[in-house]
Amino acid sequence: MPIDITRLPQAERFEPPGHQGVGPVHLFGGEHYDGAVTAALSHYVPGGRADMSTVPVETLYIVLTGSLTPTDADGATHVLHALDSARLTAGSQRSVDNHTNLPASMLVIRPNLASPSFHAPETRS
């Protein structure tokens, strides 16, 4: 099987709901993507934010440049700097803000719900 390559200039831009001042691109993902894992690169301008919302599946955040502040549903904030990472469990809520005067970039990695190989975790009764 060949190695799939995405060159940044060819990465597909998208606009997730509830995001202002955020310019994300799919490194791996998008409407016709069938891989098991997605990866998006999100660029937050100063003052950029993602509104409080529920995380549908376990998600990893890796801040590449700058500083970003995720806030959980209880109001706890966590300032993440370059190369800091965070794991969000499925069903948790979060918002993300860039409170600085510099841009910040974050890699977002999660399972692809649309993938034929995705199997939702079984719930216990």
Image: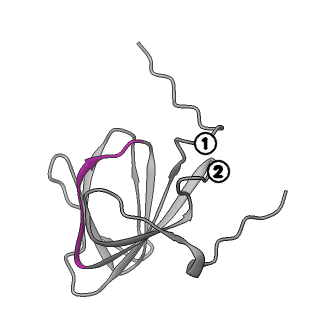
Q: Which residue is mark 2?
A: 35
Q: Which residue is mark 1?
A: 115
Residue at point 57% right, 81% down?
9
Depth check: give the residue in front, 32 or 35.
32
Residue 37: give x, y in percent of width and height.
59, 51
Q: Residue at x 63, y 77 (%)?
A: 7
- Circles 1 and 2: CB distance less than 8 Å? yes
Most common secondary structure along the magenta stretch:
strand
Distance in Å between CA atoms under marks 1 and 2: 6 Å
Q: Residue placed farthest to the front in the image? A: 32
Q: Nearer the viewer, residue 16 or 101?
A: 16
Q: Residue furthest top?
A: 125
The correct choice, above or below, for 100 with respect to 17 in the image is: below
Task: Tell me the amino acid under the disc marked 2.
Answer: Gly
Among the two numbered marks 1 and 2 on one chain, the one whose residue lies closer to the N terminus: 2
At label 1, which amino acid type do we have?
Ser
Residue 48 belongs to the span the image colors magenta: yes
Is residue 33 magenta-colored? no
In magenta, the rendered stretch is 46-56
Q: Quadrant of residue 89?
A: top left
Determine the image quadrant of residue 69.
bottom left
